[in-house]
Amino acid sequence: MTAGIAKLVVAATCATLTTLAWAARKAVCPTHRPRYDIIPLAITDDEIELRATKRTLAPGTFGLKIAGQDDPAVLGPVLATTNGAVRRRLLYRPMALSLQSRCRWSGIVAVTPSSSFLETEVPTGLGPAPAWIVDKGNDLWAIHVHGQGSDRRQTLRGVESASALGLTSLIVSYRNDGEGPRSRDGRSHLGESEWHDLEDALKVVKERGGNSCIIFGWSLGATIALNALHRSELANMIKGVVMVSPVLNWEAAFRANAHHQGWPRFLGSVITSLISSTQLCRLAGLHQPLDIRRADANRFGRRPDVPVLILHNKNDWSVPIEDSVRFAAAHKGQVKLVGFECSGHTQEWNADPVGWDLAVRCWFGKFFQPDRAEAQAATSAGELSDGVGNGWQ
């Protein structure tokens, strides 16, 4: 090998490692910097016009997050499409929304719970984690756990359903999510350490008089919920789990995201191996390896001890539904899967809030209030319409 060729090989190797390190760091980044790539074309008190895209044409109820602002605009049904533009109902217009606003599409439609709530903290092994409590005076609680790259606001759609069922809700943050305490490396551990913070939340429930709870886990939050169910000393407090777009197979999720970004799918498998390696995990910023293949296999193969409801988009490009289908099939009678037709990850509620709430009510009624299940299903649509609207203000 000539000196010139040797230099090329070294350069190519360095470039490959740099690319892999970047991709691996992105995979375990607990937060993300979204693009604010939407600018309104026209706004009235009750309508908004946007450039027509796959996102802005999606049916349902969505948030429009304004750069530098907490309060999102809330968009309702599509009213008309003309000349590459779409008009939608504007259900809530924040003061900051204007034709100069730079915005991004979001499933988040509220910034705080719609019911009266208490600001509190969950003491964790790393420090306090901010949380909200919506007290309904029930000793059966709901703990709501958000996903990677999001925050507590993501789960507020599920809090509405829990409140309608009379459950007291604890809406938590956790390590490295931008609100909770920071670990040594500041990275997402894909549920392998975050479940300890959920265990600490269970302690708060117990201290406040709750004797049992249902976990609502969104994406990574579902992984955290299953880890707590299988590993926590307080697992007997968990009576059921609602999983929204759950990550049941991290390697499959990494492969899907690599493909979506225009990279070969096998990059997702390489990342999985890299972050599991004692020698290479530091390239991703991790202080310790994450053996997620083994962790996923243990979660997937173990039959849940409690009823589980999965709500998952059939078209989810980020976390494909196939693993949810296999998980439900492997644990028939214990796991119920309800599929939705929508375009985004964790946007099942946005596409069909009535169907989402109805699925939760029917599942809850079957296992926790069997004598009221039929009545709940019959009245679900009307009650949901009244309850969710308050969350937009």
Image (cartoon, grey):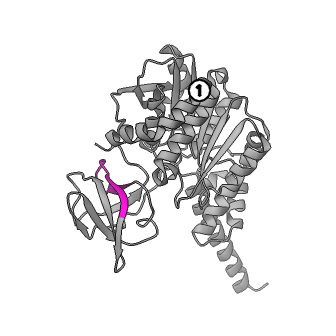
Looking at the image, residue 98 lies above or below residue 188: below
Res 65 → quadrant: bottom left
In the foreground, 253 or 115? 115
Looking at the image, residue 350 lies above or below residue 373: below
In the foreground, 78 or 51? 78
Q: Is residue 78 left or right of residue 189?
A: left
Magenta span includes 153: no
Q: What is the tally of numbered marks visible in this picture? A: 1
Q: Which residues are magenta?
A: 62-78
Q: Is residue 60 left or right of residue 66?
A: right
Res 221 → quadrant: top right
Tell me the crowding category of disc 1: few under 14, some 14 to 19, or many 20 or more residues within 10 angstroms, Cα based: many
Q: Position of residue 275 (x, y in %)?
A: 68, 52
The amino acid at mark 1 is: Glu
- Label 1: which residue? 199
In the foreground, 371 or 90? 371
What kind of secondary structure does the magenta stretch mostly adopt? strand
Magenta span includes 72: yes
Looking at the image, residue 40 lies above or below residue 63: below
Q: Position of residue 225 (x, y in %)?
A: 62, 35
The N terminus - image quarter: bottom right
Looking at the image, residue 154 lies above or below residue 268: above
Res 40 → quadrant: bottom left
